Amino acid sequence: MRKLVTLLFMGFILAGSLALTSEQARAADPIKVGILLPITGKHAKFGEIEKLSFEMAVAEINKKGGVNGRLIKLIIEDTTGKPDVGRSAAEKLISQDKVVMLGGGYSSSVTAATAGVAINKGFPFLVNTGSADIITQPTAHTPSGKKAAKLKKSLKKEKDKAKIAKIKKEIAAFQARADKEVERILPRFSIFRLNPPVSEYASGLEGFLAEVVKPKTVAILHENSLFGTKGAASFEKSAKRLGIKVLLKEGYDAGAVDFKPLLAKVKSKNPDLVYMVSYILDASLLMNQSMELKMNPKLFAGAAAGFTLPEFKENAGKASEKVVSATLWHQSLPLPGAKEYFDKFRKKYNRDTEYHGAEAYSAAYVIADVLKRAKSHKAKDIRTALAQTDMMTVFGPVKFVSYKQMINQNKLETYVVQWIDGKLRMIWPKNLSKTHYVYPVDWLKERK
Amino acid sequence: MKVKNRRMMTAPLAALLFLLVFPLFVSNDYYLHLMILALMWVMIGSAWNLLAGYTGQVSFGDAAFFGTGAYTAGLLVNHLGWSPWWGIPLGGVTAALLGLPFGWICFRLRGAYFALATLALNEIMRHIATIWESLTDGMVGIMILQTFYAPIDSPIGELSSKTPYYYIILFMAVFSVSTVIWVMNSKLGYYFLSIREDQDAAESLGINTHYYKMISLGIAAALTGLAGGFYMNYMGFIDPETVFSLHDISIMAILVGIVGGVGSVYGPAVGAFIMVMMQEAFRTGGFGLLDAFAEYTGSQFVATSASLITGAHVLGFGVLVVLVIRYMPNGVVGDWSRLMKFILGRFQRQV
Amino acid sequence: MDLFLQTLVSGFLKGGLYALIGMGMTLIMGVMGIINLAHGQIMMVGMYITYSLFALYGVDPYLSLFVSMPAIFVLGVTIQKYLLNPLLRAETILPENQVLMTVGVGMVLTEVMRFIFTSDYKSARTSYSNATFFLGEISFSVPLVIDLFIAIMMTVALFLFLVKTDTGKSIRATAQDKEAASLMGINAERITYITFGLGSALVAAAGTLLMPIFYLFPDIGGPFTRKAFVICVLGGLGSTVGAIFGGITLGLAEAFGATYVAMEFEDMIGLVMFILVLLFLPGGFKRITKI
């Protein structure tokens, strides 16, 4: 027993010290950057696209001489899509591998958990996909901030004026307390986000709906995940803004075999718009089974994620035709390098990429730019350099600003794409799109 | 069950001493993080062992209690604005409050049926946490700020924010193991063992087996709930899929027990360290040693095999689990003498 | 009314597949008395075999039943012979070691498949994958109707096997009383191989039948394992007829839950039914049907 315990720790410490000595920094050594991605697990598909894009971008940067004469070395750690593993990976990258900053972060839950590690140390972390709003909202994490948010919600239902005034006072008090609580962490709030928060994913689609489709009613279906729940909730708000009546809003567990009962229910309510927040295969099954049920609303619309991947078309076949989706990026956008990135990726890896890849590719360039501008590679200087970022990438302009309680958040437009004749085409905003949207659509005819 | 002689006490005391001074010598956050996780699993594993190893009631649903504890802590912050640290004691209470009625209803089931019922409880709790959005925020999860911070921009590896967490969980783990020892040395322990050995015989001796099984479950659930409350405080983020995970919590708890040794006091403690370290070793290719070795030798072969091994880390871990269950069915502690004989035998033959 | 009928049809068709999944599990549970927590993962391996045949040689998923079932039968026999049975002889405190072994086996199977096929989503889209026919306003998925038909045939075949053949009779005898069966000269160990192989082959069949309408990735097994034990307990452990009832009940309950409550309650409904049956009808539908 004793032998075992000693043996165990001896081995453990030996491993640690060996790894440490082998990593004494030398000036000509490459600059190490840690990337957190799901390489295995259920999100591996997206993790892979991002990994390849990161590697492609860094290879290009290094070919051009790297950063101030030093090469960049990516250390990609597998989060397996689980928050606690992601956290171990982040601790390892920072403490053992001694990377200068963190990047990546795919799913919202893993990103939220790893962000905790980064904030604790004030360690710079450039998030490029994790999309939950709270990731860049420090006050939302504090007890008082949460209380204030709860009170704000209750305010909407209240009608009595005296009570409203009282609640408003309370909110102000809690908000002040939250600001105070958050003061402690603000100097170390080191999370920067390249992609828009999930609440804005559908902002481009809103314009399309308001000007072209003008639906009166909507059914919202969403996957039960952070991304799905939040995406559906924020679209519900958009619908209210646009005066669209929400007939039904329902979640489902990813991986369901049969959506027909749910879809039959949607069909019986006969909404103008069916809006879905789903990952790839649920998205394909939903479209396939809606075809089998001969559903014919005015429009099927998806909220990015599953609806823009090439696999969506492969799996949904003709059921994918004319489906519209929000997206964060499209290769036909008039952004410098967007088309080149898409072509290079296809040439190098012999497959298509989409917005997740573009996010990762741009993040790599932002990281290189930041490392170039930073006075030193200490956490503090990299944070400062990140905050001063103002550059153009294939994903759009990158500049970190504060708004809507979010800080260090990049503000971007979102777009609308449509599957036309088996190709994903950008259709909205009109002035940026080369392809005209196809609307109205007779789905029964389309899917014969 | 009584600790028979002093010699049996020396190894655990030496280990405890080592654990007490560990942070004084190691301030690497990553290692402390792994130690904190391992200590947390010591708690969960010991609790599982009390119910399964000593009372013979195998639970496949420890995550139900773990998650309840974690959510108790999170909800106290979210709804009442309390400090999440209240969630540790209260998490133990709520977990026990979940366990007792469940036990009262389900302890009429025996063997595999009881195991299935706990599995279902696990899944039901996960679904409740997902669906009841107005209470739990569903899949959005709960994110809170941590209490302890490293001084900002201190050089990495010099001062650790993890030391307070480390000592808290060390205290909790020691508390759990001591509770198990105390229970098993008390009258309760004899009742538990008699239930495990032969429930019908125990009943015929006039032991109210239903009542004692509930006590065992209550203690186990409370200890697991405490660990859950700590998890919320330490990780700062929970969601239903993480803390009510069948695979990552419930089954892991069983593996910790089985690998270490079922029905031995220190078995789960040893199992917890083995499992946490092994999992991480497989994930990182021997804590990065393989990569370092590949770089050192410059051998392409080593580099490729290193990336292959790291790529298939879950596979390696799975194979290990299969091998341990197949060849050491009583765990490392239970089969320690057999294992030693095997290794020594080999060694002697070589000499 | 259309909505009601559509729900009924969807639930029933899905229930047919569930029955097949449950039947494999119930056989294993009946004879060995263990929960096989690798059941869904074994199905996943069967699906990968079907997928490979489809992707490499263009074999129709229904035809590949003739490959996937025997292959998985062999896999099942191997698992039982070399991994599960040796545990019976070991001196352990808990009999649950076998169950844990199945957990380990499930992990290994998942990861081996991930190693070979990566985590990418695969599917076998055939020309008839989305084929439907309509009775009135009610849509029937052609592959699901074929699946139900095949599932019924397999059930009948299994039933005949268990009732008419010597091996089948031995399996039933072992399930009823292991010791008595070995006293009667039945080689109980051989029976366990065959049972595990048979149970695995049945769930592999279910996986193969799912292939044209569903998709595939290495982690797909877990949820099906959970469904399988719900079905088994509903039907009564060891009862093949019970498994059919259990499967269809679960299919219907899920469908009606999705239509009239909410789809997110789909899994909850099964689990709550499961606990209720465990408590108030221990032995499941077997108690009522007596088969």
Image (cartoon, coloured by chain):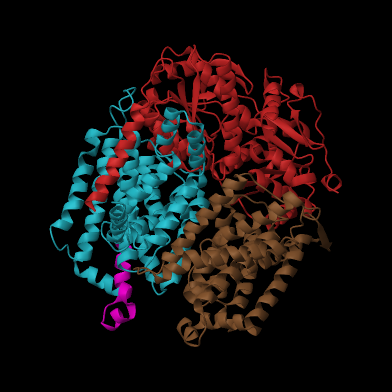
Chain colours: A red, B cyan, C brown
Q: State which region is magenta.
A: B196-219
Residue furthest left in the image: B6
Number of dots carrying numbers? 0
In the displayed structure image, the side of residue A345 where residue B82 appears, left or right: left
- In the rendered image, residue A253 lying in the magenta stretch gets the answer no
Tell me residue B241's x, y (percent).
Answer: 49, 49
Whole-percent x, y for residue C123 in the image: 70, 50
**Above or below for A326 versus C172:** above
At x 65% / y 79%, what residue is drawn?
C161
Query: Which image quarter: residue C63?
Result: bottom right
Q: Is residue B306 visible?
A: yes
Foreground pick, C147 / A201: C147
Reply yes or no: does residue B198 show up in magenta: yes
Q: Position of residue B100 (x, y in %)?
A: 35, 65
On the image, the x and y values in percent for residue B53 come to 32, 65
Q: Viewer-proximal residue, A349 or A313?
A: A349
Q: Please indicate, yes or no, whether residue B245 appears anywhere in the rendered image.
A: no
Considering only vertical position in the picture, is C69 above or below B40? below
Asked if residue C124 lies left or right of residue B22, the reply is right
Q: Residue at x 57, y 58 (%)?
A: C41
Q: Name the residue furthest bottom.
A: C184
- The residue at 66%/48% (across/down) is A282
Question: Taken as a whole, is the magenta stretch helix, strand or loop?
Answer: helix
Closest to the observer, B283 or B156: B283
Specify whether C61 is left or right of A255.
right
